[in-house]
Amino acid sequence: MPERACLQPPPSAADLARGVLRWFSSLNYVGLVEFPLAGGRRADVLALGPRGQLAMVEIKRSLADLRADRKWPEYLDDCDRFYFAVPTGFAVELLPVEHGLLVADRYGAELLREAPEPDRRLAPARRRQTLLRFAQLAAGRLSQHLDPPV
């Protein structure tokens, strides 16, 4: 009797974010998921490097997810480097080649393509605003974890 192919659903966005955060941690970055941006959008992951670098990751679980989302180019003004993170088996040739690429699962991520240095630096006022929001969000989440609302 032939073996049946076991079709697994793609990992959840939370699983992919966990793997991405583990990868960033190995590079001495710290990250936050669902990071609110100034324009009202939300980045899937924003990571802060040891010298203040800001790396953003857009998670795409499926081709349908990629096709339905056209807002990610708006994120480029809020980071120094931009990556896509996808699960194993994703058709990576459909992703823009000018951005970084990670293949992730809940246990980690593998860098397939480094995000290039941007042609221009992040505006100092935008960087400061983002770093302050990062610090406030991280401290707020820690406070809620230590003293959850009743």
Image: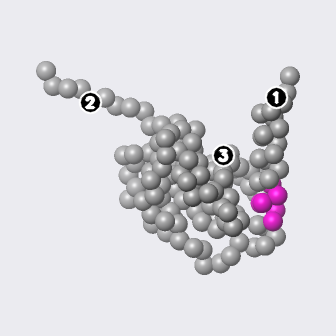
Q: Position of residue 49 (x, y in %)?
A: 66, 61
Tell me if 19 is positioned left or right of 127 in this view. Answer: left
Q: Which residue is rendered at x = 65% and y = 78% of the image?
A: 120
Q: Nearer the viewer, mark 2 or mark 1?
A: 1
Q: Residue furthest bottom?
A: 119
Can residue 25 be seen from the camera position used here?
Answer: yes
Asked if 52 appears above or below 139 in the picture, the reply is below
Label 1 near label 2: C-beta < 8 Å? no
Quarter of the image that includes the C terminus: top right
Q: Is residue 88 magenta?
A: no
Q: Which residue is rendered at x = 54% and y = 59% of the image?
A: 83
Image quadrant in which you'd find residue 113: bottom left
Residue 5: image tag? 2
Magenta stretch, residue numbers: 128-133
Mark 2 and mark 1: span between their CA atoms?
44 Å
Report the front residue among 50 and 118. 50
Q: Three-letter amino acid code at disc 2?
A: Ala
Residue beneath disc 3? 33
Residue beneath disc 1? 148
Q: Position of residue 112 (x, y in %)?
A: 42, 59
Mark 1 and mark 3: span between their CA atoms?
19 Å
Q: Of marks 2 and 1, which one's residue comes earlier in the chain? A: 2
Q: Of marks 2 and 3, which one's residue comes earlier in the chain? A: 2
Q: Three-letter amino acid code at disc 1?
A: Pro
Q: Nearer the viewer, mark 2 or mark 3?
A: 3
